[in-house]
Amino acid sequence: MSGADQDWEEQSPERLYVITGGRSGASGHTTSLDLVTLIVSKAGPKPGMQPEQASIMRLCHSPLSVAELSAYMQLPISVVTVLLGDLLADGRVVARAPVPPAQLPDRALIEAVIHGLQKL
Amino acid sequence: MDFKSSETLVERPAQGPRSEDELPETAAAAVKVVIVGGFGVGKTTLVGSVSEIRPLTTEETMTQAGVGVDDIVGVERKTSTTVAMDFGRISLNDELVLYLFGTPGQQRFWFLWNGLFDGALGAVVLIDTRRLEVSFDVIGRLEERGVPFVVAINSFPDAPVHAVEEIRGALDLPAEVPIIDCDARLRTSSRDVLMTLMRYLHSLAGA
Ligand SMILES: Nc1nc2c(ncn2[C@@H]2O[C@H](COP(=O)(O)OP(=O)(O)OP(=O)(O)O)[C@@H](O)[C@H]2O)c(=O)[nH]1
Ligand SMILES: [Mg+2]
C-alpha cells in the first residue's frame, strides 16, 4: 500500500468534530468542492489561525487538489472541505473548479488528455 | 477561537509535497478517472505505475442512514464506514491535471459516495480472469450511473488466457465497450489503458 496512511488511526471522531466546529461536509458552499478542485492560497498563514487552516494556507502556496490536501493533512475529505469552506468564504484561498461535468464528454478536453498521455 | 487540536497538530505539522511534486502555478483545472475492480486485482499498482507522484492515500467517512437502525432504545443509528483510497496524478500540460483514483475494498461502498463518480471522465474496470465474477456487480453499477468505462484484463502469470470476445460474453458487455490486456506494473501498459479509455470517450463525444 502507499505510505501516507500510517497515522490515520489517530483521528478520533471527537478530534474531527473539534476541528470542524461540529459541522459535517454536507452543507452549504462546501458541496461545490470536488476531490480534484485545485486550491491556491492567496497568502501565507496568519498568526492565530486555527492550525489546520494554517496548514492549508501553507500547503496551497502552489495549487493542490482537495484530495492531496486530505492526504497530506491526514484528514477525511469531508473535514477538509469544511475547513476550505471557511477559507473560501473569507477569501483567503481560491478554488479552481474541475472541468464541469455538464461539459463532459467534451471532444477538445479529451483530446487534451490524449495529447498529455502521449507524452508519458 | 481556541481549539483543542492545537497542540497535537503543532507537534505534527502536515508535510506537503516535495518541491518537485508541486504543480505549476499555471495549473488551472483537473479531471479524474476512477480505477475499479475486485480485491487485489492491481488497482493500486496501475495508479502507481503511471502516476508522477508517489501514490497518496485519502480517506472519507461514508454514512449510511437507516442501516443498523433501532437497537436498544429505538434511536436511529447511522452506520459509518471509513474508506481509504489511493490516488495518483499526471500533469497533462501546464494547465490540465489528471487524477487517478483507485478504490480498494468493497466496491459497492464507492457507489454510495457521489464525490467519486460525479464529474469523473470515466472509469477503468480492472479484471483478473481467475475471478471474473467479482466484476459483475461493479460493471452493473457503472452502467446504472452512466459512467463510461473500459475493461482492462490484468495479466497474472497463472491466469487462464481467454479470448477477448469470450470475456465480453462472460461479462455481458456491449460490442462497443473496449476490452484490452494490460500489465498494471508497466507504465506504458497502464498508459495504454488510459489512452484506450480516452479514445473511447472521444468516440462517445463525437457521436
Ligand atoms: N503478475 C502481475 N502481478 C500484478 C499485476 N498487477 C498487480 N500485481 C500484483 O498483484 C498484487 C495486488 O496488486 P494491488 O495493486 O495491490 O491490487 P489492488 O487492486 O490495489 O488491491 P486492493 O486495493 O487490496 O483491492 C500485488 O502484489 C501486485 O504486485 C500484473 O499486471 N501482473
Ligand atoms: Mg489497492
Image (cartoon, coloured by chain):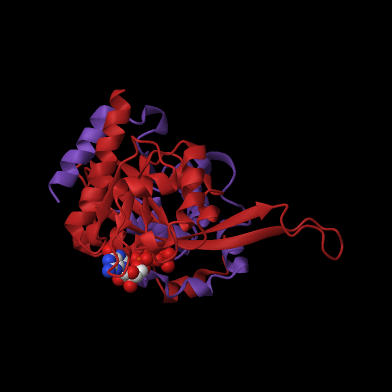
Display colour for chain B: red
Q: What residue is at 53 percent from the left and 48 percent from the top?
A: B111
Please state the total of marks drawn on the protein image.
0
Ligand 1 lies in which image quarter? bottom left
Residue B79's image quarter?
A: bottom right
Horizontal side of B120 relative to B98 (left or right) equals right
Q: Nearer the viewer, residue B159 or B47?
A: B159
Q: Nearer the viewer, residue A83 or A99?
A: A99
Residue A48 visible in the shown view:
no
Residue A102: image location, x then y, percent: 41, 28
Q: Nearer the viewer, residue A5 or B140?
A: B140
Horizontal side of A77 relative to B185 (left or right) equals right
Q: What residue is at 30 percent from the left and 66 percent from the top?
A: B156
Q: Nearer the viewer, residue A7 or B206?
A: B206
Residue B126's image quarter?
A: bottom left
Looking at this rendering, what residue extends furthest in the top direction?
Answer: B207
Residue B30 visible in the shown view:
yes
Q: Which chain is purple?
A: A
Horizontal side of B164 relative to B13 (left or right) equals left
Residue A44: image location, x then y, percent: 33, 55
Looking at this rendering, what residue extends furthest in the right direction?
Answer: B73
**Looking at the picture, does residue A60 appear above or below residue B159?**
above
Residue B50: image location, x then y, percent: 23, 57
Q: What residue is at 21 percent from the left and 36 percent from the top?
A: A112
